[in-house]
Each structure stands twice: as C-alpha cells, then as structure tokens.
Image (spheres, rainbow, N blue to C red):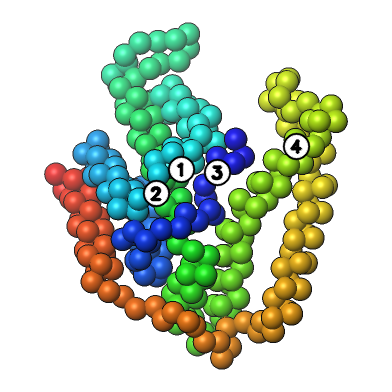
C-alpha cells in the first residue's frame, strides 16, 4: 500500500500538461484546491470532474497511476462518507439505523465530501506526476521572488519544499523495505485491531529516522561537493517563459471557476 502513494512521484512525458510552465501549474493547482471547496451542487462537481478528466487525458499519465493514488486513502474516504451520512442533520429522513438517521441532506453531504477528497488527491498528484523536481523548484522560487524585497529566502524555501516532496516516495520505499525485513524476522504488522497494528509500527520509527538522517547527510555532502551556494548569482539552463498553451490553460480554469461560482451562488 505504501507504494500506491503517488504524491511526490514524477512520471516523465512530453504531453501538453508536462510542457506547461511550472508556475502556471502551481497557481492552477492552488486555484483548483480553493474552488473545489465552493462547489455546492452536483453540476459543479460534474464540471470539476470533467476538468480533471481532461487534464489526465492530456497528461497521458496511465490511469493506473491515478487510481493507485486513491487506494491508500480508501478507508478515510469511506469513513468520511459514513460520518457525513449519519451525523449530518436534515429534514428528509430516508430510513433509521438504531439511533442514527439516514437523511437526504446527509447523503448529499457524504457524496460531496467523498468526491472532494478524491478530486483533491487526483489534482495534487497530477502536479507532481507531470512536473520534474527541478522545474517545481524553479516555479516555486519564481512565484516567491517578489518577497525578496523583505529578505524572504525564496530559493531556500522552494528547495526545501521540493526536496520534501521528492523524498516522500523514497521514504515510503525505505519503510516498505524495513517492514519486509522485520516481517522476515517474525514481526507481525497485519493481525490485531487498529491500535495493535499501530503499536506494531513503532519499531519502524528508529531505523526509518536513522535512514532519513543518513540520506539527508548524504544529500548535503553531495550539494556541498558540487559547490552549491543557493539562489544567489545562480543561472538556469532553461528560462521559464509562458506560452500560448499556458494562457489557454489559465483561460479554461478561469471559465471553470466562473461557471462553478455562477452555479453555486447565483442560479
């Protein structure tokens, strides 16, 4: 299951989405995250789904990667659905289960929250799947560049965020290796209730932290040996420049936002 987490992984390609300016993709991803919380109707979620489906189609990322990213959150998604179904008050009661009421309002809220979580995971995963770590760093740094007037460390923050994203799949792979090694020595991570399983994972923390610190030290030594000095006087092989496809992506997103706001608050 740890290998199913797709956030932080990069899927190389030459699609239209891959070629978008990383600054544009970052801004559009944040806009997508914000606007999805304003959706209040099934029509709005249909528009969001069509937007994401189009982006996945254009990115040429295999559907198995997209679906695989949802598997680790399946329990949380199902739990969120039932919590909203049975604990959302409403007037139209469909049926009762003991002391719990199953209402039409609760059903709608459960479906909305489930769709919201799934679309958020897919949307954020698509950013890292179609953007290389170097491009992501450059994009974040350029977006934070205006803050340099107040001595804000834009490059350092961008580098830290990118390294953190990049190390997510690496640490998950390391965790999987440690779990398999301990299972070969008789450790049991699958039997028992939820609390017993969580307690069984405690012995993983020490070797995982040691491995993480070792990798961080190796990365720091590698950067130091290559005379890395941060963003000051740093040149780039590829200069970020918005093109026609970037403006088209922004226009489509603006139209989506306008349609959702119109559907949720005007119609």
The residue that label 3 is drawn on is 5
| Rendering coords of residue 19 (x, y %) | 35, 66
Q: Earlier in the sequence, mark 2 or mark 4?
A: 2
Real-space Cα separation, disc 1 to disc 4, in angstroms: 23 Å
In the image, 59 versus 203, the foreground residue is: 59
Q: 10 Å neighbourhood of mark 2: few (<14), some, or many (≥20)?
A: many
Drawn side of residue 6 relative to residue 27, left or right = right
Q: Earlier in the sequence, mark 1 or mark 4?
A: 1
**What residue is at 40 percent from the left and 34 percent from the top?**
114
Q: Quadrant of the N terminus?
A: top right
Q: Is residue 14 above or below residue 61?
A: below
Q: Quadrant of the C terminus?
A: top left
Drawn side of residue 253 relative to residue 230, left or right = left
Q: Earlier in the sequence, mark 3 or mark 2?
A: 3
The residue that label 4 is drawn on is 179
**What residue is at 31 percent from the left and 75 percent from the top?**
242
| Rendering coords of residue 197 (x, y %) | 73, 28
Real-space Cα separation, disc 3 to disc 2, in angstroms: 15 Å
The residue that label 1 is drawn on is 65
Dot 1: element = helix
């Amino acid at each position: 299951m740890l290998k199913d987490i797709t956030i932080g992984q990069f899927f190389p390609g030459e699609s239209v989405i891959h070629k978008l300016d990383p600054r544009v993709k970052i801004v559009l991803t944040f806009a997508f995250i914000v606007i999805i919380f304003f959706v209040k109707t099934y029509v709005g979620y249909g528009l969001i789904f069509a937007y994401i489906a189009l982006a996945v189609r254009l990115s040429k990322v295999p559907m198995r990667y997209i679906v695989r990213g949802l598997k680790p959150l399946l329990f949380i998604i199902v739990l969120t659905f039932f919590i909203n179904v049975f604990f959302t008050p409403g007037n139209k009661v469909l049926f009762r289960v003991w002391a719990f009421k199953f209402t039409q309002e609760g059903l709608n809220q459960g479906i909305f929250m489930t769709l919201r979580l799934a679309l958020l995971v897919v949307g954020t995963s698509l950013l890292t799947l179609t953007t290389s770590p170097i491009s992501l760093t450059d994009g974040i740094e350029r977006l934070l560049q205006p803050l340099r007037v107040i001595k804000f460390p834009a490059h350092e923050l961008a580098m830290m965020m990118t390294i953190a994203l990049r190390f997510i799949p690496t640490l998950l792979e390391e965790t999987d290796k440690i779990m398999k090694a301990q299972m070969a020595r008789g450790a049991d991570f699958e039997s028992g209730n939820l609390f017993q399983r969580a307690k069984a994972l405690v012995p993983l923390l020490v070797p995982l932290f040691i491995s993480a610190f070792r990798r961080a030290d190796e990365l720091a030594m590698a950067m130091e040996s290559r005379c890395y000095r941060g963003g000051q006087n740093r040149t780039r092989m590829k200069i970020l420049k918005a093109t026609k496809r970037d403006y088209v992506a922004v226009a489509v997103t603006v139209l989506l936002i306008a349609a959702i706001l119109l559907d949720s608050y005007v119609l």
